[in-house]
Image: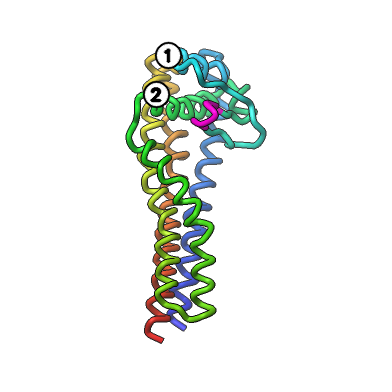
Amino acid sequence: MGFYLIEYGLIILSLLIVSLAQIILRSKYSKYEKIAVESGMTGREVAERILRENEIYDVNIAKVSGTLSDNYNNSKKLVSLSESIYDGKSIASVSVAAHECGHAIQYKTGYGPIKLRNGLVPFVNIGSYLGYIVIVISLIFSLAKLFLVGIILTALAVVFQLITLPCEFDASRRAKKELLRLGLITEKEHAGSSSMLRAAAFTYVAGLISGLLEILRLVLIFTGSDRD
């Protein structure tokens, strides 16, 4: 009974951490979406300026649907900004747009961790797809060693999340630097921009913690079945 309480407790804790991170992010976004920047520039204009000033001319900027669905795809050389970020003139808009451009700058400068993260993508995709399938098969046929293989495959996603953290923190650092250097935000607006970007970064920290808790749960199941 105690074993199952721990297992379910880990699941609940994981959900709470991820939910808390999302609540904080949306709260910060809601707050700073309402505060206009003095420059009057939109997220798209800020992205264009940062890319141009960093001599990045092969990256396009596109408007996409959704909320906080912003991302940078290096294979497509595309900064995708959600509608409210693309057209918005708020602290939230320019901060998110600058962050995605931060990733483009990382690729231009040959930032090591993002190269490593990209190299792991095929392995992570395979691990995420096969990990739980292997675990289920191992449970059906009582194959402890196969269960361990499933845990290792699933853990690849956690390694990926761990490497993603410095990439995201660095992109935010670059974003804040560029926003100030180019005069796209004022010193007064900088605090709000930093707060917004910290909240976004916390979602990745929460994802990592959640992944570690899931691996711990699987290890507990493995050790419990091994005793049986």
Q: How is the image coloured?
A: rainbow
Which residue position holds label 2? Answer: 108
* Residue 211 image point, x, y percent: 44, 57
Q: Mark 2, residues whose alpha carbon is within 10 Å: few (<14), some, or many (≥20)? A: few
Find out whether the residues at labels 1 and 2 contact each other: C-beta distance under 8 Å: yes
Residue 84 at what x, y percent from top left?
63, 28
**Number of numbered discs:** 2
Asked if 139 appears above or below 192 in the picture, the reply is below
Kindly state the secondary structure of the residue where label 2 is placed. helix
Q: CA distance from mark 1 to mark 2?
A: 9 Å
Of 15 and 26, the residue lying toward us: 15
Place residue 140 in its image quadrant: bottom right
Magenta segment boundaries in residue numbering: 73-79
Residue 30: in sight, yes or no?
A: no
Residue 157: x and y in percent read 44, 53
Q: Which of the two residues, 109 or 224, is positioned nearer the viewer here?
A: 109
Residue indicated by mark 1: 55
The quarter holding residue 106 reads top left
Assign a secondary structure to mark 1: loop
Nearer to me, 78 or 217: 78
Residue 24 among magenta residues = no
| Residue neighbourhood size for the residue with mark 1, other residues' Cα within 10 Å, grouped as few (<14), some (14–19), many (≥20) | few
Q: Residue at x 42, y 52 (%)?
A: 208
Left or right, 196 with reference to 61? left
Q: State which quarter of the image contains the C terminus.
A: bottom left
Measuring 47% from the left and 83% from the top, which residue is drawn there?
A: 1
| Residue 202 visible in the snapshot | yes
Residue type, label 2: Lys
